[in-house]
Image (cartoon, grey):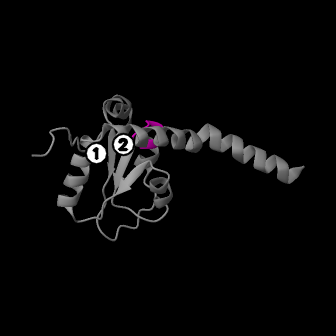
Amino acid sequence: AYPETLVFLGKVAPHELGPIYAQAQIGLCSYALGSMVEMPVKLFDYLAAGLGFVTSLDGEIDMLIAEGAGIYCQAGHPDILAKQLTELANDPGRVKQMQHVSRLLGERFDNRQQHDNYSKFIERLVS
């Protein structure tokens, strides 16, 4: 039996995301096999909200998985996805660790942090 903790909301307006993310523990980045998406915008939202993630993407997102913020699930295998979600539901310690790493990464990717880093870089170039 699978846990009854998965909620699919469909399309959600951006202003409604904060309260939804506040109730969530894991975000899904599920894409079809062969997708050309590398780093979806929703992933940065998940990181900013401190959510671990499960993704069917590979590529640049692998570095975030390697740091412990999420896990990979090959596209087109709903049985494996259900198994992975069940394992996460049964391992709250792992979910909390993924959330912790996501929160740290969210700070790193925050636009204010990125702007500060970029400004410092430009200042060094013109000095």
The residue tagged 2 is: 94
> How far apart, in angstroms, are the residues tagged by discs 2 and 1?
7 Å
| Residue at the (84%, 50%) spot, across then down | 124
Q: Which residues are magenta?
A: 46-51
- Across and down, in percent, residue 26 comes to 33, 42
| Residue at the (43%, 36%) spot, across then down | 49
Describe residue 8's horizontal placement relative to residue 27 as left or right.
left
Give the amino acid at mark 1.
Leu
- Across and down, in percent, residue 58 comes to 41, 64
Position of 123 relative to 20 (above/below): below
Instruction: Find residue 77 and report its image quarter.
Output: bottom left
Residue nearest the observer in this picture, 109 or 12? 109
* Element marked by disc 2: helix
Pointers 2 and 1 in contact (C-beta within 8 Å): yes
Neighbourhood count class around disc 1 (C-alpha, 10 Å): few under 14, some 14–19, many 20 upward: some
- Across and down, in percent, residue 111 comes to 59, 41
